[in-house]
Image: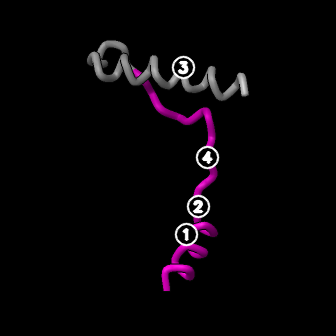
Amino acid sequence: MAERWKKAFQKNRLPIAKNEDIEFSAELADSDDLEAEERAALADARQEQE
């Protein structure tokens, strides 16, 4: 049963894209949002170097 679920899940996976339509508002951002934005930028840079 678990194997069948795993195959079904893999078939229905959504494509993963780097650029998504997410609006970032600096006016509404708190410190956690700013940290997340910085960490995402660093992760993108690491991925592009590989």
Write the start and end of the magenta stretch as one range: 1-24
The residue shown at (55%, 69%) is 9
* Image quarter hosting the C terminus: top right
Q: Earlier in the sequence, mark 4 or mark 1?
A: 1
* Residue drawn where x is 62% and y is 35% of the image: 18
Left or right of 33 in this view: 13 = right
Q: Quadrant of residue 20?
A: top right
* Circle 1 SS class: helix
**Circle 3: residue type:** Leu
Return the residue at label 3. 42
Q: Inspect the image, locate mark 4, and give the three-letter code of the amino acid beneath it.
A: Ile
Q: CA distance from mark 1 to mark 3?
A: 30 Å
On the image, the x and y values in percent for residue 10 come to: 60, 67
Q: Which residue is mark 4?
A: 16
For the point 60% across and 25% down, the residue is 44
Q: Residue at x 63, y 51 (%)?
A: 15
The percent coordinates of residue 34 (x first, y second) are: 36, 17
Q: Which mark is residue 13?
A: 2
Check if mark 2's residue and mark 1's residue have beta carbons within 8 Å.
Answer: yes
**CA neighbours of label 2 inside 10 A, class few (<14), some (14 to 19), many (20+):** few
Q: Going from the N terminus, do you reach mark 1 or mark 3 first?
A: 1
Looking at the image, tell me whether mark 2 or mark 3 is earlier in sequence order: 2
How far apart marks 4 and 2 lie (CA) works out to 9 Å
Position of residue 7 measured from the top left corner of the image (x, y, whole percent):
60, 75
- Which residue is under mark 1? 9
